[in-house]
Amino acid sequence: MAALAPLDAAVLPPGIRARFVPGINGLMMHVLEAGFEPPGQPLVLLLHGFPELAYSWRHVMPALAAVGFHVVAPDQRGFGRTTGWDDRYEAELAPFGLLRLASDAVALLFALGHRAAAVVGHDSGASVAACCALARPDLFRRAALMSAPFTGPPPPGGAPPAAEDIHAALAALDPPRVHYQWYFSTPQANADMHRPPQGLHAALRAYYHHKSADWPGNRPFPLAGWTAAELAKLPTYYVMDRRRTMPENVAAEMPTAAQIAACTWLPERELAVCAAEYARTGFQGGLNWYRNRTTGRHAQDLALFAGRTIDVPAIFVAGAQDWGIHQVPGAMERMQHHAFTRMAGCHLIPGAGHWVQQERPEAVVAVLLPFLCAGGNAQE
């Protein structure tokens, strides 16, 4: 990829700057930063998910910086203006594995001159944040996970085999269905996402809308088990109509012009920033994260920590209208009662769907600040 300038200050809220940090495990890492002066402030590291960017934290960062934190949100490996990663489907998958992604966070922490931080992760970034706290609790001393429960490393000897071939069972439904993570792992997914028939901007608008509280169908409830019949109850952004691509699935829920104009959490000018970044990079970097999950590589990475819990103070935050908290049956319970030993609370934010830190940033900050400030700073 060609060298790039940092994200233009004109698209950032006041108090946030963009810059590059070199030497991050072979990456030139692009970061957004707030509260960077004076030096020595406690660090809060914000890790985005898919299909998002460091830019997804733009509404949260100034409020955290205002109370005295050094706030840093990187474009993670495979995303945005961070360079040094392989953007091919044929790329080696190991660099996109959970332990390498956590190692990127460690390298960034040291490059910024810090030796302790609170880590906050959203969506797939929540798994990275959890792995940071699992592997390096000496560095990542508080962890906040958003929208995607983390159930811990696999048990010793690995998880037992599933009783049902879930993919064959989903394909046998009428209409046939496919789980989005396995679709995202296919060779054609990047081209489907990058060059959709409705255009990339419109496809992202439909995708973000469909998973937000603005879509009235997001009324989640716990599923009874990991079976095709139960998973088929999920919206098509999670368990897709197999006959259609993801952009075609979400196109059916494209918001009206009036709904778009009323969307204050993602106005057209801000969506244009995201669309321009993905138009340039494509989606394969982020899709390679999913391929690590669906091939079992993430579980192999975490097998080193079998039987280990996450013992730093932690919280979980999600939108009350987010199906993500229920897409894996039992995950919320395993997270709270088995994976973490100091889970201080699970907060479901009313009026928010999956993009909780964008949809309801003030409510997210109101939950984060007491947790981050407990004990005086994020480095307790």
Image (cartoon, rainbow, N blue to C red):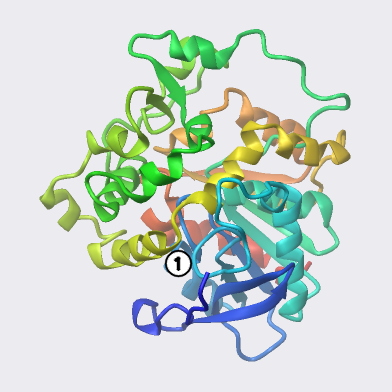
Residue marked by disc 1: 55
| Residue 321 as seen in the image, left or right of residue 257 | right
User: Which residue is located at x 75 percent, y 35 percent?
Assistant: 299
User: Which residue is located at x 26 percent, y 34 percent?
Assistant: 216
Relative to 320, say whether 220 is above or below.
Answer: above
Q: Position of residue 303 (x, y in %)?
A: 83, 36
- What amino acid is labelled 1 in the image? Tyr
| Residue 65 as seen in the image, left or right of residue 55 | right
Q: Position of residue 62 (x, y in %)?
A: 48, 75
Q: Is residue 149 visible?
A: no
Q: Position of residue 323 (x, y in %)?
A: 44, 33
Which residue reaches farthest bottom?
A: 38
User: Which residue is located at x 64 percent, y 79 percent?
Assistant: 21
| Residue 184 as seen in the image, left or right of residue 253 | right
Q: Is residue 196 visible?
A: yes
The quarter of the displayed image where residue 319 is located? top left
Mark 1, residues whose alpha carbon is within 10 Å: few (<14), some, or many (≥20)? many
Give the quarter of the figure containing the C terminus: bottom right
| Residue 100 as seen in the image, left or right of residue 353 | right
